[in-house]
Image: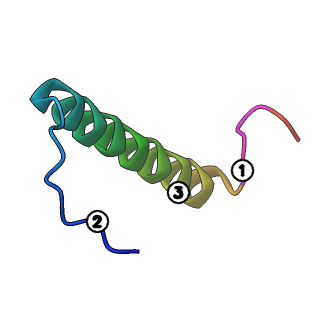
């Protein structure tokens, strides 16, 4: 089932998804940084 029709995707949605992905990666990096420095997954909760 090949679909060769070109999809019209709103450029704002593409930008929003890229930004969302970048913020998600920033959150993962912050999580790893907190784990490396404190040794806890969620700092403040033992």
Q: How crowded is mark 3: few (under 14 residues within 10 Å), some or many (20 or more)?
A: some
Q: Residues within 10 Å of mark 2 (few under 14, many from 20)?
A: few
Residue 3 - label: 2
**In the drawing, does residue 10 fall left or right of residue 34?**
left
Q: How far is disc 1 from disc 3 in space, using C-alphas?
A: 8 Å
N-terminal label among 1 and 3: 3
Of 37 and 15, the residue lying toward us:
15
Residue under the point 73% across and 51% down: 40
The residue carrying mark 3 is 32
Count of numbered labels shown in the rendering:
3
Residue under the point 38% across and 50% down: 25
Q: Among all residues in the image, which is located at the extreme bottom?
A: 1
Q: Position of residue 31 (x, y in %)?
A: 55, 48
The residue carrying mark 1 is 41
**Segment colored magenta:** 40-44
Q: How far is disc 1 from disc 2 in space, using C-alphas?
A: 44 Å
N-terminal label among 2 and 3: 2
- Quarter of the image for the N terminus: give it: bottom left
Q: Which image quarter: residue 18?
A: top left
Q: Position of residue 29 (x, y in %)?
A: 42, 52
Q: Which of marks 2 and 3 is in front?
A: 2
- Quarter of the image for the C terminus: give it: top right
Q: Which image quarter: residue 13?
A: top left
């Amino acid at each position: 089932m090949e679909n060769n029709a070109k999809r019209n995707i709103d450029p704002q949605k593409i930008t929003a998804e890229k930004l969302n992905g970048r913020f998600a990666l920033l959150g993962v990096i912050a999580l790893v940084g907190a784990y490396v420095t404190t040794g806890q997954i969620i700092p403040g909760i033992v």
